[in-house]
Amino acid sequence: MDMTTTDEPVVRFDAFAASCPSRRLLDTISNKWASLTIVALGLGGRMRYSELSARIEGVSQKMLTQTLRNLERDGLLTRTVTPSVPVRVDYELTPLGMSLLEPMHHLKEWAEAHMPEVDAARTAYDDGRA
């Protein structure tokens, strides 16, 4: 085990290991709603729930709420409640969440750019199995 200058052990994670807790994190951030939420907040800045819901078409209220809670629990976003009538709730990426923005944005752009090729591959695969 490596030691830091403060003699505290450095914990190493290996997502290939079945018991590694990083797998739970990968499960969270690889979810389509989580990745789209991270990109929406990264590009749009601080947003209200209704703004996120409108931006991410097709996400149910239940899934968006669950996604926001999971991302907040993992320290990737903050939820700020402003006492007013009605109460205002804003969501914003933390610095840790912002560190995920670039790879998530690239993944989103890659999927959009390569969708025609993927569609063609799916069609060829399906036709070959018929």
Image (cartoon, helix red, strand yellow):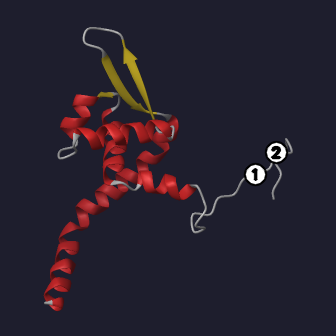
Q: How much space separates mark 2 and mark 1, taking CA atoms?
A: 6 Å
Image vertical order of residue 16 relative to residue 11, above or below: below
Left or right: 22 in relation to 113: right
- Residue type for callout 2: Glu
Quadrant location of the N terminus in the rendered image: bottom right
Q: Residue at x 80, y 50 (%)?
A: 9
Instruction: Pick the residue in front: 29 or 20.
Output: 20
Relative depth, front residue between 99 and 47: 47
User: Could you tell me residue 80's position as x and y percent?
Assistant: 41, 22
Q: Are marks 2 and 1 in contact (CB under 8 Å)?
A: yes
Q: Where 18 sits versus 11, above or below?
A: below
Count the marks: how many?
Answer: 2
Q: Amino acid at mark 1?
A: Val
Quarter-of-image position of residue 107: bottom left
Q: Residue at x 81, y 47 (%)?
A: 4
Q: Residues within 10 Å of mark 1 (few under 14, many from 20)?
A: few
39 vs 50, left or right, is: right
Residue 67 image label: none
Left or right: 78, with 65 as reference point: right
Does residue 69 lie above or below 129 as drawn?
A: above
Q: Which residue is mark 1?
A: 10
Residue at 50% in and 41% down: 74
74 sits left or right of 49 in the view: right
Residue 13 pos. (x, y %): 64, 59
Q: Quadrant of the C terminus?
A: bottom left
Q: Which residue is mark 2?
A: 8
Residue found at x 52% / y 59%: 23
